[in-house]
Image: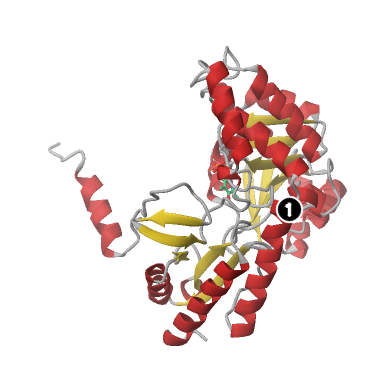
Amino acid sequence: MNRNATSFLKEEYDELVKKSFDWKLRILESGSTPHSIVDGKKVIMLCSNNYLSLSNHPRLIKSSIEAADKFGAGSGSVRAIAGTMKLHIEVEKRLARFKRTEASLIYQTGFAANAGLIPQLVTKEDIIISDELNHGSIIDGVRLTKAARAVYKHRDMGELENVLKEADKKHKRILIITDGVFSMDGDIAPMDKIVKLANEYGAMSYVDDAHGEGVIGEDGRGIGAHFGIEGKIDVEMGTFSKAYGVVGGLIAGSQDLVNFALNKSRTWLLSGSHPPAVAGAQLAAIDVLETEPEHVKNLWDNTNYFKKELISMGFDTGDSETPITPVIVGESSKAKELSNKLFEEGIFALPIVFPMVARDKARIRTMMNAGLTRKDLDFTLDKFEKLGKQLDII
Ligand SMILES: *Cc1c(COP(=O)(O)O)cnc(C)c1O
């Protein structure tokens, strides 16, 4: 057959551009700091996951440099063969202590944790029950299994219980899996209720707390601490790439979980371990969370102030309970216009549009940063108010 093997590359890309669904990359010319230089412009950073500004914290930078100096630029191997350094083990010990669980395991990324562990927890006789708004990396992990799948309405415990009743009759293992903090709306999964239902029906509980770690719970210990159920969630999964300011996936739970996960997760077994500099920075991030509570406190002070002011101006911030505050504007084109105008005014906040959210719920997703001052926030709020009126949003 006479075919052009690669013509789809351009065709599909052109289609994305036509629909304005292609990513137009903004380029950082500085570190990811509360005031960053993006595409040559000095802006207030309102869309990074670096909630606590730890990525540029002197202790993280120093620890990272020292680890590289001492142990080199790379680890030389996958963890299972010759790539486990003392530093990696130290991070896992410190993290388990911080999260008050028996043990923890570090993956290359949060995505690799979900894609590696979820497929090992269930077989074709089993079922996975997911919140309808779960993150893409959970969805991909689920796709790698042969288990049956069920979805419950977002945070709807009545529906979850109905699904559990059915699942209880038909399946061997049951895995309930949910985001902890939902990344589009900034609301929190009712993890206390989920764990209770899981216990009633003999199901496993798995939470992806990527946006909760370093943010919610005492000193940023995450969703277990937030609900006072530390050690009761079967799998607490998270990431060092957000509030911790580095990179790397993590799971925390029982020693049995960690023994199982490291012997079974293909992403962990078949992909290189973190360079020493990464492990060094992770260690310092845990240290900072344990000894400098002011970062989490500032994050929440900023969040509460910013949200309150936005609401009093008449903006719709949805169900947000966290430093992720969506400013819902309606149509996609309006969200894009608002984002562009904010950027011209010196504020970097991205629009989130269909298909990531419903067609009529396009929004600017703001992510608060502990390093912003009250003056920065007032400046930002002023611009939101001015443009909100200009675009007929408020
Ligand atoms: C960011 C994110 C991930 C991926 O984490 P990485 O460590 O960046 O790969 C997984 N799940 C959720 C909910 C996330 O927000």
Above or below for 247 versus 45: above
Q: Residue at x 68, y 44 (%)?
A: 127
Residue 266 visible in the picture: no
* Residue type at the position of mark 1: Glu
Residue assigned mark 1: 294
Of residue 143 and residue 290, the one placed in the foreground of this image is 290
Residue drawn at x 61%, y 45% is 54
Q: With respect to residue 115, does 320 lie above or below?
A: below
Which quadrant is the N terminus positioned in? top left
Residue 273 location, quadrant: top right
In the image: residue 29, left or right of residue 280: left
Residue situated furthest top in the rendering: 82
* Count of numbered labels shown in the rendering: 1
Q: How is the image coloured?
A: secondary structure
From the viewer's perspective, tell me whether residue 310 is left or right of residue 340.
Answer: right
Q: Looking at the picture, tell me which residue is in the foreground, 107 or 28.
A: 28
Q: Nearer the viewer, residue 319 or 377?
A: 377
Residue 349 is left or right of residue 231, and the answer is left
* Element marked by disc 1: helix
Quick check: 349 above or below 256? below
